[in-house]
Image: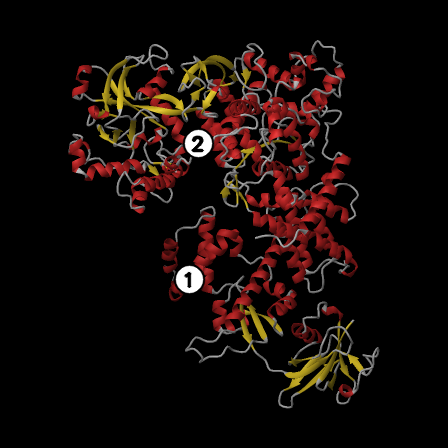
Amino acid sequence: MERKGTAKLDFLRKIEEEVQQKWEQEKIFEIDAPTSTGENTDKNKYFVTFPYPYMNGRLHLGHTFCLSKCEESVVFSHLDFTALGCLHLRSVHACADKLKREMELYGNPPQFPEEEEEEEEQKKVTDEVIIKDKAKGKKSKAVAKSGSAKFQWDIMKSLGLRDDEIVKFAEAEHWLGYFPPLAVEDLKKMGLKVADWRRSFITTDVNPFYDSFVRWQYITLKERKKIKFGKRYTIYSPKDGQPCMDHDRQTGEGVGPQEYTLIKMKIVEPYPAKLSGLKGKNVFLVAATLRPETMFGQTNCWIRPDMKYIIFETASGELFISTQRSARNMSYQGFTKENGVVPVIMNIMGQDILGCALSAPLTSYKTIYALPMLTIKEDKGTGVVTSVPSDAPDDIAALRDIKKKQALREKYGIQDYMVLPFEPVPIIEIPGYGNLSAPLVCDELKIQSQNDREKLAEAKEKVYLKGFYEGIMLVEGFKGQKVQDVKKPIQKMMLEKGEALVYMEPEKQVLSRSADECVVALCDQWYLDYGNEEWKKQATGVLEALETFCDETRKNFEATLAWLQEHACSRTYGLGTRLPWDEQWLIESLSDSTIYMAYYTVAHLLQGGVLNGQGPSPLGIRPEQMTREVWDYVFFKTAPFPKTDLPKETLQKLRREFEFWYPVDVRVSGKDLVPNHLSYYLYNHVAMWPSDSGKWPKAVRANGHLLLNSEKMSKSTGNFLNLSQAIAKFSADGMRLALADAGDTVEDANFVEAMADAGILRLFTWVEWVKEMIANQNNLRTGPADTFNDRVFISVNYGSEVMYNKQILDSLKAAKDKYRELAIEGMHRDLVFQFIENQTLLLAPICPHLCEHTWSLLGKSSSIMKARWPTAGPVDEILIRSSQYLMDTAHDLRLRLKAYTQPAKGKKGDNKPPAKPTHCTIYVAKTYPPWQHSALSLLGKHYKSNNGALPDNKVIAMELGAMPELKKYMKRAMPFVAMIKVEDLEKNGPRVLELEFDERAVLLENIVYLTNSLELDQIDVAFASEADDKVKEECCPGKPLCVFRSESGVLVSLVNPQPANGLFSTKIDIRQGDSKDSIIRRLSRVNRGLKDLSKVKLMRFEDPLLGPRRIPVLGKEEEGKLPISNSSVFHINLQENKVHLSDNGLKMDIGDTLIYLVQ
């Protein structure tokens, strides 16, 4: 829905521009360490960091969401803070090379060939659902950012660049100067208030200071034996005889190795006729699976009858059966004696081995059989497929096919005993799908055979990922564990037993420039030995002390540390620092991004805010002066002063900055970085500071990914917002408010544009209300702030200071509106402005610009960014609960009043609704009725003896039934117990069993509010003990009972003689016992123009007979009239239809007219 106008948005944007200019001038966020930092110095700091984004485009809303969590984490520190940012420029080299290649092939500007509609490809159903390797998260994000664009040129055009501008990006250096400044500009427009931009830097060797820092780190790691040299998996071109990096590929850019577990299924003798010559040799069908943890449920394996297979000899002398393509991959991974050579023993067709008996690992069946499946593809896996029909829809569909089609079995020579006895084995419990998810979902979708491809794809979509991420194992040894947590341990177990091997192949087909189909090969590389047991133990120690804010994040860390082994830290292509001892290698991006947080602390002193570090250093330091020994002195507090020509004071200043800011208080990141970057972060910190735990990370906060309007962000669908667009559309603070509302856990969050639009209105309304209060402050109440609602408002205000609420604007509005509604006598000026100040401070982390503006409206001279968190005061919890009791009672009274005025049930038209009551009596109970008291005593006994746990209702019912005094109340006793358990005891604890406050006093103190709220003439409050037996039985503490009634009155005219004020004359009933205030309240319900009832003056005529007949004189409205005092009481005579007034012992007739004036 289009907006009607942008005035409110423009208002917020104007404020933001003014505030940002103020911050820039005052350098609000530039913070340095104090001049002296010792062991006993109180560090009043908070150091929060965020993984730097790849600078190959504008920052998008997902980056912004993660950054916003950095700011929010500062809220809870209650300290002065800084958070530091830098920009990452590694991926741009490949992008630049792609542009060069596209111009070489297609001209400048490129004339790309028209893409034919790949109808067949679009119709094709994916047979394999991939569990995303989160270590490759950055690649998938890069793809997501580019949308459906196939060419780099098109990706650049989607960023709004012209052809003549795109040409410049063919040089990697151009990227360095283009996107980083835009990122800084966008973040400043966002009002990122935890960024000291002096400390920003570029992380490539173009930055000599950072390059020196990374070299120091890697020399240290190598000396400490954390880095080794050996074989690692990489995409490789056999024809070219070398690794095939992105820039060397014709197709398959960004594709990496995909790890499979190769399951060894031994063929049981006697062998099929075709294999008879292999008698006595160990022959295995080898199946590549992504799900080794499901092997407990194998019932058979699948072979494609018309596919070509080979039998080849492995280095161990075993014989493997697979496709030629997969065997070629294996030969480069150490499977065969000679690298790259497949010793083929025999060529066979799939039908030659159908029906052979197999001994498979983990399955509960001693023998399973090779059965036919016609849909197996040759370009993926080994051509041999494991069958787990309990959890794989394809497998159960194919198994059912061959079970019910005898002709199919006969065609391929499959005997009944090979198929019919085999049933799915329950191995995984999936929420909503039980322990046989595949049969269940196939039945639900009415899948008839393995040829129902579309339905099978839908079935896999439903259960496959849900089973992996939410499934719970049922098998012995792993029972009760999450599926995703046991995948690696089960794989490790099978590898150790020799039942499986690790097998790699490219995620998708990769063709080199020489048109060679690439394989995955084991190549020599430098790697970080994260599998080292001692190092792993140290990293586990860091994790034990780490705050993760979420149990799922901790478990993800634990699972990662359990399986993590080596990580290749070198590559030959791209941008980055070269390995100091072997400069043919570059240090890859995940490997040099583990302790750069330490560099933040000194970057501003080395680089002076120049991103590439090539400007003058504020301390006069040259990059070459930052030697190994100098870095040691800065970062290791026990290191001696180095031999250097740098002044001692200079190095002490660097060390002081580091010692003050470190460790990192919290690192905020997407959850997909836990299995890689964040785990390496723990490892490398403990490696660099093994005996100084004070430098280890203190906390990691992992958040989910960001959806946009409940859908994945994608440029190809148009469901995408970058940071600049979001600010233009919603303002910085409007966007921030919607981000805060989007989510706050490890689950995926959802940015809803409608919420952002609503946020603009809420922010604008808040400022307008603040302005209104400032303008009208002299009309607000002063003096003691001691009414019931004053006291409640004070406690709520204090409570909001210590309990930060993400729905903060809703909370502000609710608290403010409640106070305004309940404060019949008017809001107190001091409380209103204390509330505004406190809530402005609370809102500042989310909406800093608006709050800076509000702060200045309040007359504050310094920036709100320098203000401290509100000081918490005493919170009267009982008072707050009594206020909630009041609101609950008012709500209950409204419901009961609505029910009272409904027509009685009967035939249509037979009953008219009763007249609205005028009076109400609220009954409160001092004690519970005896039968309720007995039930509560029983609940209290169980609550105390079981540490707050209560037994099942059946147990309680049996015990209650055994009590003689409860026999006649049993039908009422259990509903009462259920209500107390669910509504009160489980929510509020044992205090519900006792009365904490005087209910009658609370209601009487707020009787005016209740009377006005229900629009009644009078409400009385009485004890239930004074009422009839029915009230006594039904009324209990905390649950008042009300009885409505109607009382007749005498109709009297109320006239306002004041000219041109919009008020009018009306008639209302005067009832027995009315007071001046009750008359004015009744009048206000008829005449809505009366706002402030304290300014209404009620008068009677001196001559009640002739007075109303005289024409009022302008300016002399009170002439001939007398004021009605607060002590006056009205009396009525219904028979004579007359009203009298008694006051101070005197009784007088008022006639049929009263006067009201508004002062």
Tell me the SS state at disc 2: loop
Q: Quadrant of residue 818?
A: bottom right
Dot 1: within a 10 Å radius of its alpha carbon, few (fewer than 14), some, or many (20 or more) residues?
many
Which residue appears at 78% of the width and 86% of the height? 1107
Residue 120: give x, y in percent of width and height: 36, 36
Residue 132 numbered mark, or none: 2
Question: Between 581 and 801, which is closer to the camera in this rendering?
Answer: 581
Residue 973 numbered mark, or none: 1
Residue type, numbered disc 1: Ala
Where 756 sits versus 1158, above or below?
Answer: above
Residue 447: give x, y in percent of width and height: 29, 43
Where 149 sits versus 1138, above or below?
Answer: above
Residue type, numbered disc 2: Lys
Q: Is residue 66 left or right of residue 387?
A: right
Q: Is residue 14 left or right of residue 136?
A: right
> What distance separates the C-alpha of mark 1 from that of mark 2?
55 Å
Residue 812: give x, y in percent of width and height: 64, 52
Quadrant (top left/top right/bottom left/bottom right) for the C terminus: bottom right
Res 83 seen here:
no
Residue 339 numbered mark, or none: none
Residue 52: give x, y in percent of width and height: 59, 29
Which residue appears at 53% of the width and 26% of the height? 677
Where 14 sits versus 959, above or below?
Answer: above
Res 615 seen here:
yes
Dot 2: within a 10 Å radius of its alpha carbon, few (fewer than 14), some, or many (20 or more) residues?
few
Where 964 sits versus 339, above or below?
Answer: below
